[in-house]
Image (cartoon, rainbow, N blue to C red):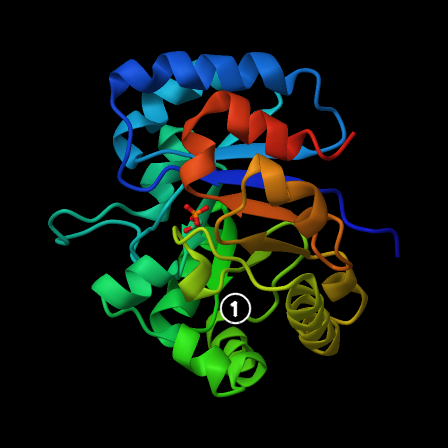
Amino acid sequence: MARPRPFVAGNWKMNGLRSSAAEMIRIVQGARALTAVDLMICPPATLLGLFASIVEGSPVRLGAQDCHTQSNGAFTGDISAEMLKDAGASAVIVGHSERRTYHKETDADVRAKGLAARRAGLCAIVCVGETRTERENGRALAVVRTQLEGSIPDGATADNLVVAYEPVWAIGSGLTPTPADVAEMHGSIRQLLRSQFAEEGAGMRILYGGSVKPSNAKELLGIADVDGALVGGASLKADEFLAIAGVYR
Ligand code: PGA
């Protein structure tokens, strides 16, 4: 099977106001020249509606950062996958380490959210990754394997599932794993996807995330089985996000 089409997604986390529309417009303008890569921005839910009008007719897609498992109901403060889709999202990040840490989300929660995403017609970007201690203790591969086995919904396809490997210690720290460690991890994730989904698993995109920036993107994105990036801080600036995605030409 051919290598999956590259995918670079920006995770804005809890950043961005309506005045950030100018940055989003710059991303859309720059994206027109980048035809070899799929591009997505995941802004806070408050900006989805506004940004949907900005990306209309462009190749840039929108994603959300979390969803509830139910489609509606008495869940004050929560947002369903259906609502995100209605607001203009085509994907949703689930199981980001910040959700796993600050909201105590378990693998089972993440899996249920992935299923909710599919029910609503959204692609689920499922995040996994080890802590620094787990890596130092030689448990990184085993930890990520367990997370994947518990978090990935059955019957997923290359269209409705993307995996993001984000070592917790690399997020927002400026640190990244060695290329050899990334290659080993992505190879292990690919093997698991292939054993679970056969040929379909070969086409599923596996993103690397954690301190991706223009200066290290070429090296990280050139590693086998790295099909793109989930970019946090650097995605807030159009020129940096576009420079990262511009590795694919
Ligand atoms: P970072 O975040 O690029 O700022 O390290 C990545 C992420 O948390 O998705």
**At which x and y percent is residue 241?**
53, 30
Residue at point 14% right, 47% down? 77
Residue at point 81% right, 66% down? 199
**At which x and y percent is residue 207?**
61, 53
**At which x and y percent is residue 122?**
49, 45
62 lies left or right of 22: right
Q: Give the answer, above or below, for where 75 lies relative to 148.
A: above
In this view, the residue in front, 109 or 183, is: 183
Categorize mark 1 by other alpha carbons within 10 Å: few (<14), some (14-19), many (20+).
many
Residue marked by disc 1: 153
Q: Give the answer, above or below, for where 57 lies relative to 223.
A: above
34 lies left or right of 213: right
Q: Quadrant of the N terminus?
A: bottom right
Specify whether residue 63 is in view.
Answer: no
Residue at point 39% right, 66% down? 110
Residue at point 25% right, 30% down? 46
Q: Amino acid at mark 1?
A: Pro
Q: Give the answer, above or below, for where 22 lies relative to 200.
A: above
- When asked about the image quadrant of residue 198, the answer is bottom right
Q: Give the answer, above or below, for where 69 lies relative to 237.
A: below
Specify whether residue 242 is in view.
Answer: yes
Q: Quadrant of the C terminus?
A: top right
Q: Secondary structure at mark 1?
A: loop
16 lies left or right of 8: left
In this view, the residue in front, 127 or 175, is: 175
**At which x and y percent is residue 100?**
31, 66
Q: Is mark 1 within 8 Å of ligand 1?
A: no
Extreme-right residue of the structure: 1
